[in-house]
Amino acid sequence: MVLILSFGTGIEIYPFDDGYIVNGEIDIIKVDKFVNKVWDFSGRDIWVRPNSESSIKILDDSLFLTDWEERAILRHLKIALFIY
C-alpha cells in the first residue's frame, strides 16, 4: 500500500489501530485507514534523533517520543493526555 500524505514529510510510518502513526519530523500525526488526519502533535524540536534511532516507541495505548535534544514525552492515545 502507498500512502499519499498531503501534510508534510513522513519519516516513519507505523500501522496502528485502524490507521497509521506518522512521524512527520515536526509533527506526529495519526491518520485513519483512508489517510485522513485524526490528530497531530508537535513538540519543541524535531522528532528525529542524532543517533539514528527511532524517535517513536508505540506502547499499548501510548506513544513514547524522544526529540533531537533527547527530551522525552509520553502521549496517551486514547485520551488527550500529555506528560512531559
Image: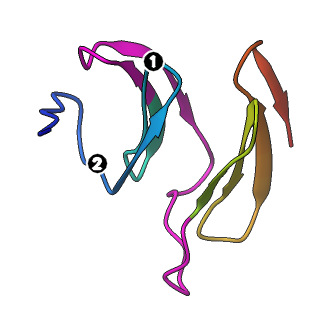
Q: Quadrant of the C terminus?
A: top right
Q: Closer to the camera, 23 or 42?
A: 23
Q: Which residues are magenta?
A: 30-54
Q: Is 76 situated left or right of 11 in this image? A: right
Which residue is at a point 45% across and 18% down the rendered structure image?
Answer: 18
- Residue 61, x across and y down, in percent: 76, 29
Residue pointed to by mark 2:
10
Q: Is 52 situated left or right of 73 in this image? A: left
Q: Quadrant of the N terminus?
A: top left
From the image, state whether disc 2 or disc 1 is nearer to you.
Answer: 1
Mark 2, other Cα within 10 Å: few <14 / some 14–19 / many ≥20: some
Q: Is 3 situated left or right of 31 in this image? A: left
Magenta-span inclusion, residue 3: no
The amino acid at mark 1 is: Asp
- Residue 36, x across and y down, in percent: 29, 13
- Residue 47, x across and y down, in percent: 52, 57
Which residue is at a point 76% across and 36% down the rendered structure image?
Answer: 60
Question: Is residue 60 positioned above or below 10 on the image?
Answer: above
Q: How many marks?
A: 2
Distance between mark 2 and mark 1 Cα atoms:
18 Å
Which residue is at a point 36% across and 16% down the rendered structure image?
Answer: 37
Residue pointed to by mark 1:
18
Residue at the outermost right position: 83
Q: Secondary structure at mark 2?
A: loop
Mark 1, other Cα within 10 Å: few <14 / some 14–19 / many ≥20: few
